[in-house]
């Protein structure tokens, strides 16, 4: 190594040390960092090619936004729903975020935080998140528990797969409203988490609090407060007051989910509302939402199916398989209940896995995606009949002797749009797909004319 290169490396290392020193100088607490970032990030994201490290402090973030550090600190405390710990959770503590990259693209985040444990010590909670802020993996990096062998297990860790900040807000609001209805309580993902300890229930409760804290920070620092507490509270309130309008799977949903996703070992329930997206949904649907049967504030429970990958026990990551949407089909002859399953990965992404209406399995929908429905829209608009690309026209649905073809097709299209909008972030863009189909039809017409 030449002398000039050695000097550059030494200066770089000193600069990094000074940056870290300045970041930590005001806080009495050492921030929670990965023990071995190179190895740990690769274990958590095996396909990562690189990662970036960023230190963020609440007071500095608040000042940059023009809110003030104290104001942001208090606002995050409100979202947490609990007072900040004066030792482990001061506003000047640097939080360490690892941005995970695959080539030039971000594929996730790794983030952790200290959490006080009963007594004088602290635990360290570490997480891998997907690009939506959903937990992909959780584990204790440090655990001063006398019963750590009961907590540091695949069985305990797997309970947190798929959870988001919204699930903690749902849990909080259900408690605020003192809800007792079993069907609605079955949507409480936090209440399902089993405490395996025998003597350290307080430590278990602190873990739940620490996880909520981490989710609050991730949501604010990386997603701009995407999960708004008041909006989640309103959705839960709507559920509690309008149960008759909401469709659920049974209280034990997993066996039903496994009909469509046999490898599913766990699920999370999200509460989707079209309230702020109704115009966009209507445009993509090509139809108005019925104000009586599809009111703007209607809540749709979406069941997210996961497979547990215990790749290196006790570590276990979650792999999303797909989504199940209970959907009402209202006709002049009554209401029909549909359960629509849509895939999430590989060749099944955005495709219907199964449709069941009033306990009747309808194979005609299997394999359809929103592309097929947009194609049909173009064919109707142009007045062209093309049996090669029209996968919708052959569908005929009879349930209990009643023809509900048009309504069932609309429900399937609506379910696909909801999943694409809220989970795939408009991956199947209507304008782009429509143009491709129109160009294809023009090309076919030219061939025929020539």
Image (spheres, grey):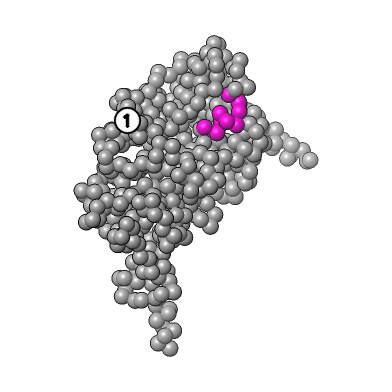
Question: Where is residue 37, by image quadrant?
Answer: top right
Query: Which residues are the magenta region?
Result: 151-159
Farthest-out residue, front: 401
Q: Is residue 323 left or right of residue 299?
A: right
Residue under the point 24% across and 48% down: 293
Residue under the point 39% across and 20% down: 82
- Measuring from the top left, give residue 413's x and y in whole percent: 36, 57
Task: Please tell me whether residue 313 belongs to the stretch shown in magenta.
Answer: no
Depicted 255 relative to depicted 399: above or below: above
Secondary structure under the numbered disc 1 in the rendered image: loop
Q: Nearer the viewer, residue 164 or 87?
A: 164
The residue wearing badge 1 is 181
- Measuring from the top left, give residue 355's x and y in whole percent: 41, 54
Residue under the point 26% across and 48% down: 294
Q: Nearer the viewer, residue 367 or 108?
A: 367
Question: Where is residue 32, by image quadrant?
Answer: top right
Depicted 422 relative to depicted 311: above or below: below
Q: Nearer the viewer, residue 194 or 71?
A: 194
- Measuring from the top left, give residue 198's x and y in whole percent: 55, 16
Residue under the point 45% across and 52% down: 342
Badge count: 1
Residue 205 seen? yes
Residue 421 seen? no
Q: Is residue 14 left or right of residue 427?
A: right
Depicted 198 relative to depicted 430: above or below: above
Count residues near mark 1 (Cα–Cα under 10 Å), then give few for <14, some for 14-19, many for 20+. few
- Measuring from the top left, give residue 104's x and y in whole percent: 57, 50
């Amino acid at each position: 190594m030449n002398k000039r290169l050695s000097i550059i490396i030494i200066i770089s290392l000193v600069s990094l040390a000074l940056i870290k020193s300045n970041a930590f100088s005001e806080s009495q607490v050492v921030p929670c960092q990965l023990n071995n970032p190179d190895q740990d990030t690769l274990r958590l994201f095996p396909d990562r090619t690189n990662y970036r490290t960023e230190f963020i402090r609440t007071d500095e973030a608040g000042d940059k936004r023009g809110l003030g550090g104290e104001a942001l600190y208090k606002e995050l405390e409100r979202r947490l729903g609990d007072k900040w710990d004066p030792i482990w959770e001061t506003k000047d503590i640097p939080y360490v975020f690892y941005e995970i990259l695959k080539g030039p693209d971000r594929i996730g985040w790794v983030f952790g935080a200290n959490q006080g444990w009963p007594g004088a010590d602290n635990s360290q909670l570490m997480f891998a998140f997907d690009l939506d802020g959903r937990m992909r993996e959780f584990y204790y990096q440090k655990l001063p528990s006398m019963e750590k062998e009961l907590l540091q297990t695949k069985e305990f860790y797997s309970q947190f797969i798929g959870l988001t900040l919204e699930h903690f807000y749902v849990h909080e609001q259900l408690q605020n409203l003192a809800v007792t209805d079993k069907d609605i309580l079955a949507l409480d993902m936090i209440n399902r988490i089993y405490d395996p300890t025998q003597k350290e229930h307080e430590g278990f409760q602190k873990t739940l609090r620490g996880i909520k804290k981490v989710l609050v920070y991730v949501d604010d620092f990386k997603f701009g407060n995407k999960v708004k507490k008041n909006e989640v509270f309103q959705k839960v309130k709507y559920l509690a007051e309008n149960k008759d309008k909401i469709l659920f799977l049974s209280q034990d949903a997993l066996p039903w989910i496994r009909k469509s996703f046999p490898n599913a070992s766990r699920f999370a329930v999200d509460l989707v509302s079209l309230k702020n997206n109704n115009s966009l949904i209507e445009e993509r649907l090509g139809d108005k939402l019925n104000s009586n049967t599809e009111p703007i504030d209607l809540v749709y429970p979406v069941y997210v199916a996961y497979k547990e990958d215990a790749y290196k026990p006790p570590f276990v990551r979650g792999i999303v398989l797909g989504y199940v949407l209970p959907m009402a089909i209202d006709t002049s002859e009554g209401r029909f209940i549909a359960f629509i399953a849509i895939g999430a990965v590989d060749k099944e992404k955005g495709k219907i896995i199964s449709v069941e209406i009033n306990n009747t399995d309808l194979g005609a929908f299997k394999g359809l995606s929103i592309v097929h429905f947009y194609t049909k829209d173009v064919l109707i608009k142009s007045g062209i009949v093309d049996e090669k690309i029209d996968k919708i026209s052959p569908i005929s649905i009879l349930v209990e002797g009643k023809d509900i073809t048009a309504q069932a097709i609309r429900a399937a299209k609506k379910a696909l749009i909801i999943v694409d909008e809220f989970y795939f972030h408009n991956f199947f863009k209507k304008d782009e797909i429509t143009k491709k189909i129109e160009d294809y039809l023009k090309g076919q017409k030219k061939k025929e004319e020539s």
